[in-house]
Amino acid sequence: DIQMTQSPSSLSASVGDRVTITCRASQSISSYLNWYQQKPGKAPKLLIYAASSLHTGVPSRFSGSGTWTDFTLTISNLQPEDSATYYCQQSYNTPRTFGPGTKVDVK
Amino acid sequence: QLQLQESGPGLVKPSETLSLTCTVSGGSISSSSYYWAWIRQPPGKGLEWIGAMYYSGTTYYNPSLKRRAFISVDTSKNQFSLNLSSVTAADTAVYYCASWYNYGYGYFDNWGQGTLVTVSS
């Protein structure tokens, strides 16, 4: 199985800040990397697919980058509604695996 | 846009079989664009992919479940189902059904709201 790790596990930032979350795969996955946002009590929502493509309807302050084993999710101009847990997920092969999540708190 | 809705018992006894159904609306479960997947999330923990099925019958499972999972599709009802046998307390989780867009790089683009299943006697 491909293991996914994320850092940090949690962070706190202020409205308007720029935050970066890192995801690392245990082997090369090219650009087969997706990012999801999950709010408490809700299902995850797709933000970014193929490492850097913004899903339909997702605000442009979200962006993704990276390839091979190292990836980042950046939230520019952080908004209160961005408080959530963010997960990366590899789509390179099965079993599909997710990172452990990064909890973002907006002060 | 697809809508997915899970249904099934919220309480299952240890050693019994957990059975859930996902009803798909807004599109056909026979679409060539999608695999139909189950994902679970134990309380306070991360996401675990259980498996997925194509309408034609091709199926993939997470080996970590040790062959306890079985996914089936009913095209006449536009539904797909999960059976998880020999459950223990470790199977207590919110279970989500989701659509896996199968083209390009692939991603889960539509999710059900999730249903909590508790394993307890």
Image: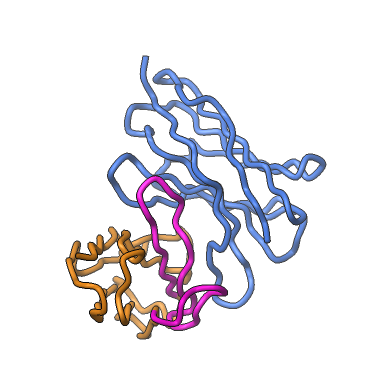
Quadrant location of the C terminus of chain A? bottom left
Residue A9 is situated, as x and y percent measured from the top left of the image, at 19, 62
In this view, B107 is above or below B114: below
Occupied quadrant, residue A72: bottom left
- Residue in the image at 56% along x and 63% along y: B109
Residue A56 magenta-drawn? yes
The chain letter of the orange chain reads A
Quadrant location of the N terminus of chain A? bottom left
A77 sits left or right of A57 in the view: left
- Residue in the image at 52% along x and 45% along y: B113
Q: Which span is picked out in magenta?
A: A33-61
Nearest to the observer: residue B54 or residue B111: B111
A63 sits left or right of A10 in the view: right
Colour that chain B carries in the picture: blue
- Residue in the image at 36% along x and 27% along y: B88
Residue A35 is situated, as x and y percent measured from the top left of the image, at 41, 69
